[in-house]
Image: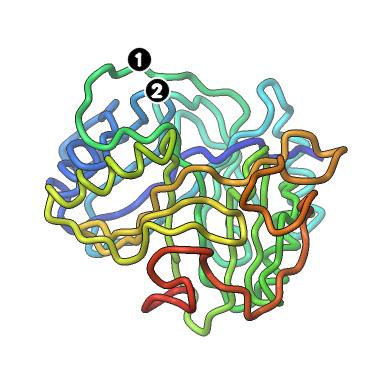
Amino acid sequence: MIKVKRLGHASFTTPDFEQQVDYWTHVIGLQAVERTRDSALFATKLGQEAIAIERGAASQMKKLSFQVAPGSDLGELQANLQKHGVKSETCSDITPGVARAVAFDDPKGTRIEVYADCNFHKRDTSDTGIGPVKFGHVAYRVEDVQKITDFYCDVLGFRVSDWLGDHFSFLRCGVDHHTINFVRYETPALHHIAFEVKDWSELHRTCEILAKSKIQLVWGPLRHIVGHNIAAYHRSPDEVRIEMFCEMDLMKDEELGYWEPRPWHEEMPLRPKRWPKETWRSAWGFGSFGTFPGYP
């Protein structure tokens, strides 16, 4: 089975295109690698594609992409999708860095594009904005968490990292604790997207940049318990919840089966498990004893 290796880029529509271009470049610190009157593609300063936007009537995430191992036969993925009753199609030149992809709709209706080979863009050495090191993960509100979790594991090769009760799943495709999350909710919607910064000092700098841009945090800084990442959340001008994080749990060896030991872990060794439903959302920071409005 072909297995997803990493998160690619997310595609959004926006009613205020110019404002979003300014936000992603001057606040978040991504570089625009392609720009037309009605669309733009942004990559990290290290050259990996991360966010695409286009003019639209409302703010909405339309597509999400993932990369599998370079050189993989995408026909194998299509055969597996067909076995699960999912129609797919091949696409070409979905971005300047991706020449060929397989596209399909996942069970919640999100358009997914999977590719094997991609090109990095030129490194941007400017110090504009936050400058995250990568596009880290995406979280969704869904009606049937088990169904969508099974699909991502059985079809795309994700592994379950943890459950919070029976309503919140955390899935990994690489060493990071989670690349995609699903939480049960009556109204399906995007929950948040997240970017990794290199360390805690950079997260502190991130909060200062947001403050100077007159963007308030909606939660954090805090240390989560499930995943143990230090995180700070804000909303983009389009009301998309954005998390900036560092120090996420890592599983560097799947055969060992435990997260790289850290001083803040509750158990040694700490392995994937089902956390009690009443587990605090964070070990310290604002909201440690419960939730902030709209989370989860």
205 to the left or right of 17: right
Q: Residues within 10 Å of mark 1 (few under 14, many from 20)?
A: some
Expressed as whole percent of the image width and height from the top left, the position of residue 13 reads 29, 54
**Distance from Cα at disc 1 to Cα at disc 2:** 6 Å
Q: Amino acid at mark 2?
A: Gly
64 to the left or right of 182: left
- Determine the image quadrant of residue 259: top right
Q: Residues within 10 Å of mark 2 (few under 14, many from 20)?
A: many
Expressed as whole percent of the image width and height from the top left, the position of residue 70 reads 66, 22
Which of the two labelled residues, at mark 1 and mark 2, occupies the earlier sequence position? 2
- Determine the image quadrant of residue 242: bottom left
Residue at which label 2 appears? 47
Q: How many marks?
A: 2
Identify which residue, 117 or 210, lies in the foreground: 210
Residue at which label 1 appears? 122
Above-or-below relation of 58 to 187: above
